[in-house]
Every structure is written in C-alpha cells, then in structure tokens.
Amino acid sequence: MEIAALRELLKNTQSERAQFTSDYQQSLRYYTNKDDITNRNNGESKLKEDGKDNPLRKADNRISNNFYQLLVDQEAGYVATVPPSIDVGSDSENQRVSDVLGDEYGLTINKLVVDGANAGRGCLHYWIDEDNNFRYAVVPPEQVTPIYDTSLTGSLIGVLRSYKKLDSDTGKYFIVHEYWNDHEGQFFRQDTADQRVITPYNCIHYTDVTAGYETGTGNITHHSFGRVPFIFFPKNRYERSDLLKCKGLIDAYDSVYSGFLDDIMDVQQVILVLTNYGGTDLNTFMDQLKKYKAIKFENAGEGDKSGVDKLTIDIPVEARKTLLDLTRDNIFLEGQGVDPANFHNSNASGVAIKMLYSHLELKAANTETYYTNSLNELIRAIMNYLGFKDADSRNITQTWTRTQVEDDYTKAQTVAQVANFSSKEAIAKANPIVTDWNQELVDQKKDIQESDGFTADQKFNNDDYQDKSEDDIDKD
C-alpha cells in the first residue's frame, strides 16, 4: 500500500473508528465501575454530605453499582472457564494442535469473550516468530479496523491496526499504522504533533538465512498464510456491545440508589423556623434551648402565629425500595444474566437451577455460535502450519463446557437411570464426580484388567478392548 492510499483509508474510516472507540471506551468505563453518575468525580464513587448549596438538600452522593462487570464476567466464566476442546480427527493430531495452542489458550478465549461483550467483537492476530513457532495473541479491539469486500459473504481482505508507540530516542509517542492483507504486512509511522506527516516505519529486520546475518531493514513483512492473519470474533450479528442492553437501567438504578442515600443523609438536617422570637442572637437561642429546654417568644394575642416550626424531609422508603428491586430484576433480565441474590435456597432442584440460568444460556449459546466459526479459522491456520492434509476442508469438532451451579444429586440419579442404556463414554462425560472423562475411561479399563488378573504394568490393547463386549472379556 502506498502512503497516499493509506491516507485515503484513514480518512474514509475515521468516523467509523472514532465511533467504535467511543462506544468501546464507554463499555470499559462501566466494566471498571465508572458509570456515568461518577462523571463529576472523574469516575470515582464518592460520598459528599455537603455537595450542594441547598440547605435542605446538601448531600450529593454519587455511587456506581457494578452490575455490568458482573454480567460480563458471569458470561465469560460460564462459557469460557473451561476452554472448548478441539477434535480434528485423531488423538495424535489433537495433541499436536493442543501443543501449539499452549497454556494461554484458555485465558485467550476468556479475554475474547470479555472483549466481545465490551466492544461487540474480539480480535486475534497470529504469526510465525523468528524461531519458526506459531504464535497468537489478543489485539485490543480499538486498535483494529477490518476491511471487508462487498460480496454477500463479506470476506476479510485487509486489516488496519493503529496504536501509539514510544520513541526511546526522543521520549515522545508516535502512531504506528499496520496494514495487513493475505500475503504481507506494511508498517507506517505518523507524527502525533503533525498527523499529516506519514512515513514508512522500517521496523522489520531482514536476515540472510544462509549467511546468518542481518542484511537491512524495511517496512514490509511477508507471510505465507494465504489469508489475512487476523481473526475477528463477533459477539452478535451487528457487533454491538452488551452494555447497550442494560445501560439505561443501570443508570436508573445508580440515580435512585444515590438519591436514596442523599435523603438518608439529609434527613438528619433539621431546620428550625422561628416566628416572633424574642431575642436577637441565635447563639443565645441555642444556649437557652439547651439550658432551660424552653424558648422565649413575643405573643401579640389571639391569632398570633409565634412559635417554632421545623423543616424535615420525608423519605418515600417503600416506593424507592420497590423501584430499586424492579430495576435490579430488569437489569439481569435485559442483560441476560443470573442475579446471585436469587439463590435463596441452597437445595434448589436441577430444573429450578436450569430455569435460573435460561437467559444466560441463551446469551452464551449465541456467543458460542459466532465464536465457533472464528475458532475454526484459528485451528485451520494451525493445521496448515503443522502440514496436515486437507486442513482447510477437514471437519473440526468443538465441545464447549458450561460452568454453573449444579444439582449433583439429581444429575447422579439421572446418570444411574440411563447407565444400562448408554455408552461408557457418555456416562463418564455426564458423571458429576468425574472431572476428566478420558482419564475415567482409562481408570475403568485398568480396573477391568486388574480384576481379570492383569497387572497395571501389563500392556493392554485399547482397540481390542473397545471391540470386545463385557462377555468376551469375561471369557478371556
């Protein structure tokens, strides 16, 4: 891409990038418990007993209630605590793919779910490092702008990534623009002081592999993936943040809650209204009130309104409590989450628990649907890197596991009832006391071997075992 073309791309995508970044930053504020009600306090929840000039309404408390982070982390924990297992055809190939995914695989999926909820989409970049290892990492959503073709399939044809970087020589920041397509990535540098200045960013070091030394630098790096090495994980069809579902309700709850707290503080302020007070000094008035428990007034006779009245604040407690409860219920309803306060009964049945999780399951199932295709793209890139045959057309099976409060007793009863009509693998997967169903099957085979006179050190052919019925094993 020429610099002139990059300028045109930046110009044409400027409004889109600005709107996306604004929406994402708003979601991040709510995710970090900095709701709009705290804007006056620079995002910090504060108690202020004397925040207003009104003598009857002095308190100006601004408390942010962290419902949104609870909703986001709840889904991330529910759908991504256990990373989806991958099956590409055989145990040996599965292990090779798993080795490339590495230890960061589970955390990566969790980050992508959180980014998807906050930004409407997560993004992953993969590459081959200098040691010829396949690497991948989550890219902050606000840094990347996808470029799609205009076909009905909307294929990804390019990615613009923009971010700030510190110049170690000058101590100043500059903007790096990367543009990636299906065969190369180009790097450009933009001055923050004068953004009209864009030059090639020669950060790529070229090496003569045969000679083993560096031959120069440039701003272009080539790759052989045959596709843009960025994968987007859309949260929904329109790539919209989950905050939009419940922001108004959260703001309403913050407003009512903080106003309720204002009233509680203000109700302690009692203002005395004196009519025809006989003295002239309020300090003398307070001293006489404390000392004699009496107050002197001038009285002009019948119809005189001399005396003391007090101004207080009445708090509509029941109305506010009802409104807070209703708003809280709607936050979890519209946000498709589970209110922890609803777990009143620790002995809830399996059906009751499933009903409690129904809205969260609906949201998680939708996330899984969109993320499955994107994750398949990552797995195919890994299979191509490993040299698997038919990597781009092979069937990939993903198994996503939910993490939730369960009624293990009811589940165990169900497993026991269907044990005689189900495979050992199905029973091992459904058994509530089993954490690793593969290991459970291995342990079962080991028990059978030992009961038939085998020792743990003797070899056992798994394929032969799977082909034999229990009667055949007894005969052997």
Image: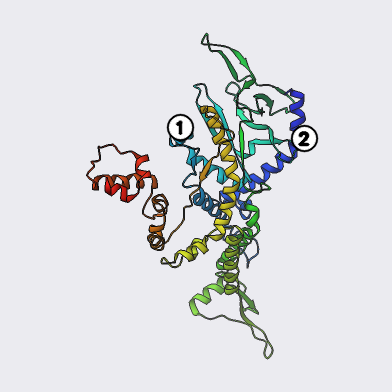
Q: Which residue is mark 1?
A: 96
In terms of sequence position, does the residue under pointer 2 or pointer 1 come before the other? Answer: 2
Please report the residue visible at 44 percent of the width from the left and 35 percent of the height from the top.
95
Label 1 crowd bin: few (<14), some (14–19), many (20+), radius 10 Å:
some
Q: Position of residue 70 (x, y in %)?
A: 53, 54
Q: Nearer the viewer, residue 148 or 42?
A: 148
- Screen quadrant of the C terminus: top left
Q: Residue 49's quadrant in the figure? A: bottom right
Please report the residue visible at 68 percent of the width from the left and 48 percent of the height from the top.
238
Q: Nearer the viewer, residue 253 or 439?
A: 439
Q: Position of residue 303 (x, y in %)?
A: 69, 89
Q: Residue 190's quadrant in the figure? A: top right
Q: Residue 432's quadrant in the figure? A: bottom left
Q: Is residue 139 visible?
A: no
Please report the residue visible at 59 percent of the width from the left and 48 percent of the height from the top.
369
Circle 2: element type: helix
- Screen quadrant of the N terminus: top right
- State the residue lying farthest toward the top: 211
Left or right, 383 with respect to 234, comes to left
Q: Position of residue 197 (x, y in %)?
A: 73, 24
Q: Nearer the viewer, residue 159 or 268?
A: 159
Q: Is residue 153 visible?
A: yes
Q: Which residue is mark 2?
A: 12
Mark-to-mark CA distance, 2 and 1: 43 Å
